[in-house]
Image: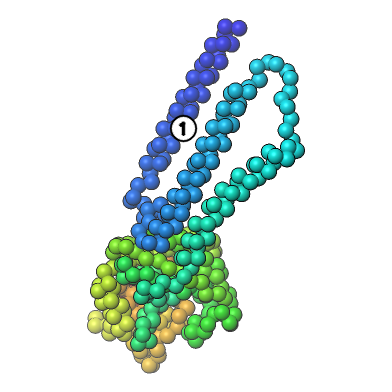
Amino acid sequence: MRALARMCRTRGARRWQLLASALVMMLVVSGCASEDLPMNALDPAGPVARSQDELWDLVFVIAIVVFVLVEGALVYFVIKYRDRGESTPPKQIAGNTKLEILWTLIPAVILAGVAVPTVATLFELAEKPTDNPLEVRVVGKQYWWEFEYLNEEGQQVVTSTDLHIPAGRPIYLSMQSLSATIGDPGVEALDVKTGDVNGGVIHSFWVPRLAGKQDVVPNHTRNMTIEADEPGLYEGACGEFCGLSHARMRMNIIAEEPEAFQQWLDAQAEPAAEPQEALAQEGAELFATQQCIACHAITGYEGPDGQLAEQRIGPNLTHFADRTQMAGGIIDVNEENIKRWLDNPQAVKAGAQMPRLGLDPDQINALTAYLQSLE
Ligand code: CUA
């Protein structure tokens, strides 16, 4: 009997040790939630994300109160009415109408209360901003994001992976999903609401510090607003499984001072720079003869036989060397990575739509020099 009691004591101590270490672990893990996390939705960096975060705070507080009340009552009753060896069964309350109404009403009232600010925020954020928003078209492709700016003069800038925005100004996004297999540049000019475009898959545009997710659905135009208070880099990713390289469909939102942004946009609207070095000039010719031109646009490009580069299947490369990252934001734009990519895109990013072109090292060198000249 005494041995049994000792065993129970050690078991009890063991349990407390486990509980204590679990608590310490929780503290350690919560310490990871530092402000350095680039995709921390609980660290909002703009008004849209902030209003969503405030909503989250409210719901979280209510959830905590409910949790403490329910679990507190549970623990209290478990202890107070624990089995003391008296075998009389407690009074049964099944079918008690008053109680049934009470515990149906309480959660209903709580949920209705939460719904008021939730629905209000939903409607508020769905509105197109009235204070001079910058409109950007976003196209989800497999597996990268394309961004298109249109200004009043009809000047068009098409980029990918890096989305430059002015800080402190709302950005109103019109988002569509297109499969990379659609070849005709005219197709993308269509209003996809007509359903004339198909073959895309569902992506989800997600920049946690600027706004919550918004699904990007084929044959529909979805809108959302993002805004950054301060210049900085805000990382984003596709938030909806869209295929083999879904996890490699990333993006960089680069918020700049308005003047710097305007300078950037003006520079982007310029046609591509003429290659100066012989190697880059050779690469520019290969661009036409080695099939690159069948998928990629370069504004101002003219091939050896006068070919124009206007396709929008792959990323627009007019100012490719200006971008920080390539291949859907998984590798930096530098000589080594460009060469790796040109040699075998599939080895860098499985499922990428760019095929292996069978380029030899000299061709890769020349094309790399040309791509790096596209500033
Ligand atoms: Cu696009 Cu996941």
In this rendering, is residue 350 above or below 297?
A: above
Q: Position of residue 108 (x, y in %)?
A: 61, 49
Q: Could you tell whether 110 is left or right of 263 in the image?
A: right
- Outermost residue toward the right in this view: 95
Colouring convention used in this rendered image of the protein: rainbow
Judging from the image, what secondary structure is the residue with disc 1 in? helix
Q: Position of residue 125 (x, y in %)?
A: 46, 65
Which residue occupies the foreground of this view, 342 or 244? 244
Which residue occupies the foreground of this view, 52 or 182? 52
Three-letter amino acid code at disc 1? Ala
In this rendering, is residue 293 above or below 90?
A: below
Q: Could you tell whether 358 is left or right of 218 in the image?
A: left
The structure residue drawn at horizontal position 43% and vertical position 35%, both measured from the top left corner, is 25
| Rendered-image quadrant of the N terminus | top right
In this rendering, is residue 29 above or below 212?
A: above
The structure residue drawn at horizontal position 30% and vertical position 84%, both measured from the top left corner, is 270
**Residue placed under numbered mark 1 in the picture:** 22
Q: Could you tell whether 209 is left or right of 12 in the image?
A: left
Residue 55 seen in this snapshot? yes
- Outermost residue toward the bottom in this view: 306
The structure residue drawn at horizontal position 40% and vertical position 76%, both measured from the top left corner, is 135
Which residue occupies the foreground of this view, 205 or 287? 205
Residue 352 seen in this snapshot? no
Q: Position of residue 176 (x, y in %)?
A: 50, 74
